[in-house]
Every structure is written in C-alpha cells, then in structure tokens.
C-alpha cells in the first residue's frame, strides 16, 4: 500500500502532488504535426458540431465546478451559449433541449448515477452527448455519442483533486476544438494550447511553495467556519475550496461570488472570521481585480482574517491581506488550474491536523451509483 501511495502518507497527498502530470497527460497527443487539434472520439461530424446552438454541461460535485469553470472559457472562445447544471436537477426539470444541443457530461468515475440519468434523459430528448471522463470503458462514456478522456490516472481518494484539474483541461480542449471546427482561428487555438502546456510547471511551482499554507492550516485546526470568495472563474474555485474543506475536514465552509458579498454574505463577517479570497489576475478585463481588492478591503475593515490567493507581482492586495499565497502569472481563464491547488493543500493539511481519514471521509463514497 505504501508503494501505491508513491511514498506519500495518503492517496490524497499523492494525487494532489500528481497534478502537474494529470494536466500534462490530459494535454498529450491532442494535436497533429500541423498543430491542429485531433479529437477522434467525438462521435459527431464537424458538420454536426457546426450546427450546435447550445451546450449544457451536466455533472455532480467537483465535476460540476469544473463545468462552471469551463463555461467561462467555452463561451468566451467558441461564442456558444453554455449552461451548467447539476445532473440531478437537470434530469427532473423540463429542460429545453433539441438535436442542436450538445450535452457534455463530466464525471471522474463515469458511474455516477445522477449524471448517467441526465445523459439518458438528454438522449431521449434528441440531444448529442459527449462525456468527459477519467475511467475508460465506464458506463457514461459507453452510453454517450462521444468521449474525451481525461488522463489523470486512477483517483483513489474519495474527494476529487487531480481529476478536477484534468476535467478543466479537457473541457478547455473541447472548447478550443469547437473554435477550430466552427471558426478556423488556428492561431488563437495554438496560442491557448501553448499557454496550457506551460501550466504543469506552474502547478509544480505552486506545490513547491506550500509550506506556509500547511502551517496556516495547522494553526486553524479548531476553526469552525471558513468562507471562500471568488469572482469570474475564481467563483467556482471558491466553491470547490469550500467543498474540499467540508469533505476532508468537516468544517462548515461556503464559497460565494465576490460580487454577491454586499447582497448578504458580508453579514457573516465578524472579527477573526477566516476568509479565503481568490483574486483575479491584475490583467483581468472589466476591472475585476480592483473590484475584488475592494472586497478584501471591506471585509478586512470588519475584522475578517484575509487569506489571499494572488498572482506573483500583485502588490495591490498586500495592504489588506493577513496572508498572501502566491500563484504564478497566467492568462485569466487558466488561473483556476493554479488557484485551486493551495485550497486543496489547505483542506488536506487541516484534515490531517484534526487526525481525520483524508482518503475516506465519513459518509462519502467515491462514486455514487444510486440516485
Ligand atoms: C462523489 C465524490 C465526489 C465527486 C462526485 C462526482 O460525490 O465523493 O468527489 O466529485 O461524486 O463524481 P464523478 O465520478 O461523477 O466525477
């Protein structure tokens, strides 16, 4: 068992540290010698892909947060409307779906019953279905028209980590493929692909700089509630950070959109309340960086303990941060692949400090095969 864990104490620790490989392997072999994306298991002709008018992403848990991240990128790049919905909610609404809808399911295991039922429902309604999945030959990809496998390797720990990064990577590849098929724009596609290729080394840099995050987590072992704040692609990252903390450390945690702060959550801020803030890149459009820096200022003024995840070189956050956790610079849409890592490490370390079983948290299953 020790060998299976690659020298780490737990699968969770191994899988978090595997993430540079999970992303690199998911990117591997997707382009031909001319730099064109080649996805040969799409199960749809290019003509069909050009006819798509809407994408609906269905998933549960961490995979649904990967879908939320993907929405920002796919809409931005491919200009196709994307909805993201929890599979169990999608299934029992009366969703507006037709032959020109592409339903993309995201599932590590490929066996989550809620997600499978959503895929079957989508097929019944005439939609085309593509599965983003980490498990070869599992039920969801078998029942879908097409598949794009993530190559994160087996994920053993119940709470998902490396599969999340691989799911974002794969859905980005899908988005770029849609750009290629529908618009040409080879240069744009190649540029993002090369930025993605640079991500594994940057994840490694984040992992190499986690000593302080682990220290903070150990100090916080008695914490009762932690809030997570993010905006744009940082919003699903905030929710994923909260989910990891609930799952691994049984701490009440909530992730919310930074812009929503003033509409309610700011009432929760009292002296000493720890809040993680996922700060957008200073290069972000629409002044989002400045807006989130103001949020940090507001909650700090009310006594929050601010744990700020910000890009290297972002000095604007420093006056309002109790702690600054640095991630390398990257294009705004790729930042989730970096900013979630400290949140995973934090949850792992806090869980360990509480003496909990990080690989097998209470009440949870790796793959939920019942509705
Ligand atoms: C379970 C796991 C989660 C996972 C979710 C979806 O609840 O505990 O970690 O995110 O299922 O699993 P899937 O295999 O469909 O990605």
Image: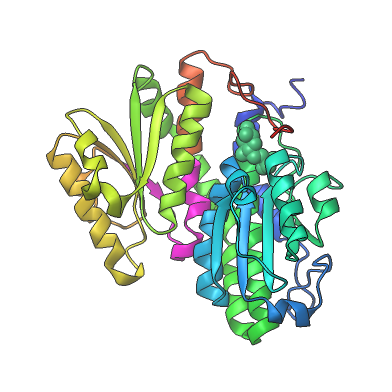
Residue 348: image location, x then y, percent: 51, 28
Residue at (69%, 30%) from the top-left corner?
366
- Judge whether residue 339 is colored magenta: yes
Left or right of 51? Residue 33 is right
Q: Ligand 1 is in which quadrant of the figure?
A: top right
- Looking at the rendered image, the quarter that the N terminus falls into is top right
Figure coloring: rainbow
Q: Position of residue 16 (x, y in %)?
A: 59, 37
| Residue 212 visible in image | no
With respect to residue 151, does 286 lie above or below? below
Q: Residue at x 76, y 78 (%)?
A: 48
Residue 125: image x %, image y %?
A: 73, 62
Q: Residue furthest left?
A: 301
Say which residue appears at 49% left-offset and 51% top-offset.
Answer: 338
Q: Which residues are magenta?
A: 324-341
Task: In the rendered view, tell whether residue 333 sits above or below residue 248.
Answer: below
Q: Is residue 39 left or right of residue 346?
A: right
């Amino acid at each position: 068992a020790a060998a299976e864990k690659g020298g780490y104490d737990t699968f969770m620790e191994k899988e978090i540290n595997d993430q540079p490989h999970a992303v690199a392997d998911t990117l591997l072999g997707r382009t031909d010698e001319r730099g064109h994306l080649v996805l040969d298991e799409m199960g749809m002709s290019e003509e069909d892909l050009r006819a798509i008018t809407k994408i609906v992403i269905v998933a549960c848990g961490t995979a649904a947060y990967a879908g939320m991240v993907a929405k920002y990128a796919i809409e931005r790049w491919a200009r196709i409307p994307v909805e993201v919905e929890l599979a169990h909610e999608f299934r029992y609404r009366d969703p507006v779906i037709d032959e020109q809808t592409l339903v993309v399911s995201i599932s590590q295991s490929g066996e989550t019953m809620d997600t499978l039922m959503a895929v079957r429902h989508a097929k019944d309604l005439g939609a085309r279905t593509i599965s983003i999945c980490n498990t070869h030959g599992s039920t969801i990809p078998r029942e879908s028209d097409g598949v794009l496998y993530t190559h994160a390797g087996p994920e053993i720990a119940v709470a998902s980590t490396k599969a999340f990064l691989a799911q974002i990577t794969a859905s980005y590849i899908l988005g770029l493929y849609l750009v290629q098929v529908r618009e040409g724009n080879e240069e744009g596609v190649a540029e993002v692909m090369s930025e993605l290729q640079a991500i594994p080394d940057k994840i490694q840099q984040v992992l190499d700089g986690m000593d302080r995050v682990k220290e903070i987590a150990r100090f916080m072992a008695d914490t009762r509630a932690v809030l997570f704040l993010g905006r744009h692609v940082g919003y699903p990252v905030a929710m994923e950070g909260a989910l990891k903390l609930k799952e691994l450390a049984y701490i009440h945690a909530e992730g919310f959109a930074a812009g929503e702060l003033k509409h309610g959550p700011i009432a929760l801020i009292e002296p000493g309340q720890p809040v993680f803030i996922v700060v957008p890149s200073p290069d972000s459009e629409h002044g989002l960086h400045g807006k989130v820096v103001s949020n940090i200022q507001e909650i700090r003024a009310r006594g929050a303990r601010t744990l700020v995840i910000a890009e290297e070189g972002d000095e604007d956050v420093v006056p309002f941060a109790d702690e600054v956790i640095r991630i390398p610079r990257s294009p705004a849409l790729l930042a989730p692949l970096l900013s979630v890592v400290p949140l995973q490490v934090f949850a792992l370390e806090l869980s360990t400090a509480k003496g909990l079983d990080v690989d097998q948290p209470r009440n949870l299953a790796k793959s939920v095969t019942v509705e």
